[in-house]
Amino acid sequence: MERKEVAFRIYRYNPQVDRQPFYDNFKIAVERGITILRALNYIKEHLEPRLTFRAFCQAGICGSCAVRINGVSKLACTTQVWDELTGSGDDPILVEPLNNLPVIRDLVVDIDPVMEKLKQNYSWVRPAIAEGEMGQKEHCVSDGEFEAINAATDCILCGSCYSECSMTEVNPRYISPPVLLKAFRMNNDTRDTLGCERLGQVSGDNGLWDCAHCYKCAEHCVKHIPIVDGIHRLREEMFERHMTRSEGARHAQAFFDDIRSTGRLREATLPLRTLGVVKTLRMVPLAAKMGMKGRTPPFVVKPVPGIDRVRGIYRRLEANRAAKQGGE
Amino acid sequence: MEHKFDIIIVGAGGGGLFAALEAVRTNPQVSIAVVSKLYPTRSHTSAAQGGVNAALANKDRDDTVELHVFDTVKGSDYLADQDAVDYLCSQAPEVVRELENLGAPFSRFPDGTIAQRPFGGTVKDRCCYCADKTGHTLLHTLFEQCLRRGVKFFNEYFLLSLEHADGECQGIVAMNMRTSAIEAFSAKIVILATGGHAKMYWNRSSNAAGNTGDGQAAALRAGIPLKDMEFIQFHPTGLRKSGLLVTEGARGEGGYLLNRHGERFMARYAPQKMELGPRDLVARSMETEILEGNALTSDAGSYLELDLRHLGAEAIKKKLPQIRELSMHFEGIDPIEEPIPVRPTAHYSMGGIDANMARTAVSGIYAVGECACVSVHGANRLGGNSLLDILVFGKRAGQEAALEAPRRPLRRVAPSALWKAADELKSYTSHERYERYGIIREEMGKTMADKVGIYRTEERLRQGVEEIRALRERFRHIRLFDTGTVYNTNLVQILELKNMLDLALCVAETALVRQESRGSHYREDFPRRDDEAWHRHSLCTLEKGGDVRLAHKPVTMGKYSLETRSY
Amino acid sequence: MKYAYFLSCINESMTKEVDLSLTRWVKDLGIELVNLEKGTCCGGSNLDYVSPDHFLVINGRNIALAEKMGLDLVTSCSTCLMTLRRAKQALDSSPEKRELVNGHLAGEGLRYNGTSDVKHLLWVLTEDYGLNRLAAKVTAPLWGVRFAPFYGCHILRPSSLLGRDNPTAPSSLDRLVEALGGSLVEYGSKNKCCGFHTLLVAEQQSLSMTGNALEDAVRAGADYIVTPCPLCHTALDAYQDKALDGRGVSRNIPVLHLSQMVGLALGYSKEELGIDRHMIAA
């Protein structure tokens, strides 16, 4: 069995003792096939009992042991030491607590913010069945209906996506990826009756439209859930339900309209159409400065050649949609 | 610090959460809190892969509650209490539908009804499932519904003691793990739902690190008897290296067990049911194969193979995605390409807090799920009946507690209970102490696996009892090297080890005394079931000096009388 | 080497210097870019919220225009790249969606077959052209200039869609800098989000993201940030003063487009490459 001395550089912070966080280095002999969690257990049992981290199932299903390994949020129990060796294999493996959550001690973070947001955003199914008729009969659901939410129900609330999220990093009040994913999962469950209220709630301030679609959540989801697709689906649903008064929705609508009218985005009026007059006025000073550099977008945009074809596509798609809705 | 609630639920797995949910639904006026050493969705319920049994008759139209009762009683080797089994099975269709109604995404048949698949030890296909993440989805569904109902949670609180006076519940003492503060939770009713204790087999266990029987140990110390502790289920298919579990669903879907000759050896042990024989039988057959040299060998020990390849890539990906992922993560093999290396692993504790339909000997204290012994599993639990157990009895306990609470006075936890707990915790840091946690824990795991394992004999069990006693003695000198109060995991580990050691002694002592083979308890020196002498439950209590005192209790019979158990 | 070149809206308006600088030097390398004149805005990542069908047909059309020319489609904007590839992935994996799109394209004599790839200019240079060949063309090596390569999001993530660089340790832009003779600074923000996409709906948060990246690059001692995406450029350059406001960062940092950096190394002047158009003087 292949064996190797591996260095670990681990984030340490005990608020009772340490004035500020620091990093501890450990070097241990590791066999190929060993997970980061087993290495942490070894260090705790043999070298530093005070090293503090969470771990429970050790099988990748409870989500307790999510930490950042070499800067990326992962489950310690499903990550192989061998896969984290970098450089010539001698660089230390960096282990740190999840980002965007307060550190309690060492690798342990406070998960309560996630729980609070789940609570505020109707992260549950409210079935149509009356309370008194619970358990009497099953909903008739085709296997296909669950297909849409199947991946989303894999979420173990480990917090990796929360830790990776660009928007949460700069706005702790942002709704966050796992909560949006739950909303997607619930809103696409045919048994649920809260769709409209939930969508209204999650699309409020610090909500659905603030996602910068940087894709970090989905990229690093330990269960490979396409979280951003879920967020997109919620935004689509906003339009389907005609909940289009928000800035985010107006912004999207502008793209849609511009492609029809010129084939190009009319950036000059985009702020006005997204934000309205008052907020747009605040952008005037910067726009003036940009104007001096010739960077202001033109107010008149010449349509692309063949715009009639594009408009034709719009007309036919619109007609199709109208026909479909009429038929329902 | 003292909290006061009408109902305190300890543990936030499926049993605890359903109890909380049902209590709120039954009586929104009662105040309820769930106290758990984990965030709820991390509870071990999430690891249950296979499914939950209910005679919905969606697959086999002629399936009935009676057949489910019969399978369960037979599976238990006739040690289950039949009134409890009747209740379990009769409630099964309702609780499964209820979870479905509340949002659990059960897999479906083409006609839109809940799909059912075969599971070990049953005559009908009755196991309902959500792919191979059934427990995970049920746990999340229950957690979501608890959020919906505004259930109050005290997460990361460790149970220190169960308090009662004159046989009436007072509440619990628990430690806030973030601060190490010792807090009293006075409550009219306490529902224990703390999960199992099979982690005492440590590396030879499929259990999570924290399945240390905290509720059982607290009950034991509070004078509440434990029942049938000798019965530990060994799951046939643990992964070779880690002991992690490969669901029975893998065999339910048609997986083969092969020895090193490529032979489906179960043909020799259970010619009818083959790989889908009951767990104790399959696990023993595998152990025999290993002992007789028919196993494959590796650095990580002997093993057999679970072969899924003939199911095809599509079926494996669709129906057993987690198994595939586990095999890849922890064994480095893809079951589409290669067989999975497996061997039996300690998996489930049938024994637990003696409870009669979830009520314990102390008025106002309930116990449900794996920490309890109701007893519906008797000497051997059927696959798909553990999720059912937590749902049915969690719900029942919640309902009864909500109805009973308004009629009970609140008796408060005595301040002395807090002082006592504080003294104990402080004592671990004493400089005169020298024993190390890791060493005692390793030895405990080894003793349990080697001396109180699948095959048991008088001699090995005597050694086991002696060794566990010696380890308990050494534990009195265990030293806590981390004296901080912020999230002190070392302290928690020591408290968990104390619990496991007390319970390990109960397991070893009851196993030594039971001179017969029944269900999961297999005595090489007494290979037959002896109904005359041993068709009865074992009870243990703790004496003042720390010794285990044994007693017995009759089995509640019903429709089905004793028969030989063959498959 | 010949490609269809996708005209990104922002490069037609606010960041004209991208295409300006690109046209200076592509011919030097023997690369021919044919403008996709009839192409339209890709819809950013916004069009599909309003209507997923429009998103598919409009972008199916964009790609089909390139297919008709028998060329791969190249873009200088990461969000256009990601959006076009998202449409391509959806169409390539679903005959029904292809049928929907082709129904709408037939009238124009177009058909989406999936034969044209969609690439970023960076990939054309690093993969198709080759960095060795490019290095041989360098006449004004960027010796001693320290670059902070800023990849941004949509050229990296989702990696299942883009699949060139490891999103946690991207290297293609780094290798390009080195091929041109420049040196690199190590900094943590290279694969982070610039914040551009929320500039209008969550300005403060967006500026925090921008500011974090800028501050990080300044502290690492970079002379320039270089980015393959005009949207990232706009956030980092046009909004730089706002983003660094109150942060106590010692200096501004100029931001180059990928196309400008290449142009510099090939001997063009800052004016020829439109670097004087930037808000932050270089």
Image: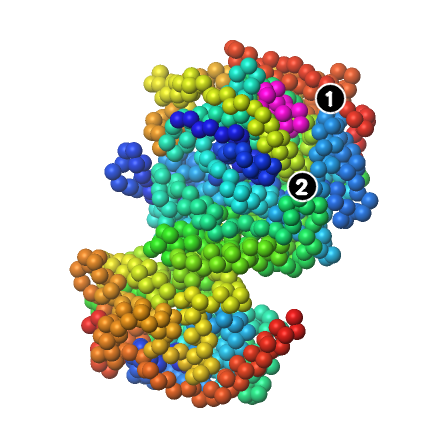
Tell whether position B364 is magenta.
Answer: yes
State whether residue C40 appears in this view. Answer: no
**Residue situated furthest top in the rendering:** B545
Q: Label 1 amino acid?
A: Val
Q: Secondary structure at mark 2?
A: helix
Q: Quadrant of residue C13?
A: bottom left
Q: Are marks 1 and 2 in contact (CB under 8 Å)?
A: no
State whether residue A313 appears in this view. Answer: yes
Tell whether position B120 is magenta.
Answer: no
- Estimate the x, y position of residue A195 in percent, counting from the top left: 55, 58
Report the quarter where the C terminus of chain B lies. top right
In the drawing, what numbered circle is on residue A157?
none
Q: Label 2 amino acid?
A: Val
Q: Residues within 10 Å of mark 1 (few under 14, many from 20)?
A: some
Q: Residue at x 77, y 49 (%)?
A: B59
Pick the front one: A246 or C266: A246
- Estimate the x, y position of residue C254 in percent, counting from the top left: 23, 69
- Estimate the x, y position of residue A101 in percent, counting from the top left: 37, 46
Q: How is the image coloured?
A: rainbow
Which range is magenta?
B346-365
- Estimate the x, y position of residue C168 in percent, counting from the top left: 39, 57
Q: Residue at x 63, y 52 (%)?
A: A128
**Camera-nearest label, 1 or 2:** 2
Which residue is labeled 2 in the image?
Answer: B95
Q: Secondary structure at mark 1?
A: loop
Q: Residue at x 62, y 57 (%)?
A: A190
Which residue is labeled 1 in the image?
Answer: B555
